[in-house]
Amino acid sequence: MACSDYEKNITSCNCTYPGCPRKGSCCACLRHHLSRNELPACAFSNTVERTWDRSFTKFIESNK
Ligand code: SF4
């Protein structure tokens, strides 16, 4: 199912991971990462996002 807010979402997506089919589809993105005990790119600063470490541990460490 296509995301009806794709155009709006993609303009604010900070994810630098190339080729991801979920980019701009926030519900699919969030579902994917939560199922892996991770958070999506937009939960992180641009600097931390570029590490592609989406773990809760990284989130806590980067928000101390
Ligand atoms: S955060 Fe993950 S699922 Fe979301 S667009 Fe980036 S790589 Fe894809």
Image (spheres, helix red, strand yellow):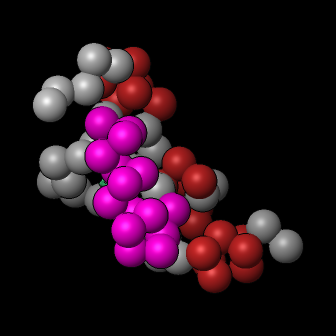
> What x and y, as percent, mark residue 53?
47, 75
> What x and y, as percent, mark residue 59?
65, 70
Q: Is residue 4 magenta?
A: no
| Residue 64 to residue 4: above or below | below
Asked which quadrant contains residue 7, the reply is top left
Residue at the far right in the pictured view: 64
Q: Is residue 27 magenta?
A: yes
| Residue 42 to residue 11: above or below | below
Query: Start and end of the magenta stretch?
Result: 25-39
Q: Quadrant of ligand 1?
A: bottom left
The image quadrant where one finds the N terminus is: top left
> What x and y, as percent, mark residue 17?
30, 59
Identify which residue is drawn at 30% across, 36% down.
25
> What x and y, as percent, mark residue 50?
46, 64
Identify which residue is drawn at 78% across, 67% down.
63
Describe residue 38's horizontal placement relative to residue 15 as left or right: right
Describe residue 47's horizontal placement relative to residue 40 as left or right: right
> Can residue 20 be seen by looking at this rendering?
yes
| Residue 22 to residue 45: above or below | above
Q: What secondary structure prevails in the magenta region?
A: helix
Numbered-mark total: 0
Identify which residue is drawn at 38% across, 68% down.
35
> Can residue 51 be seen by looking at this rendering?
no
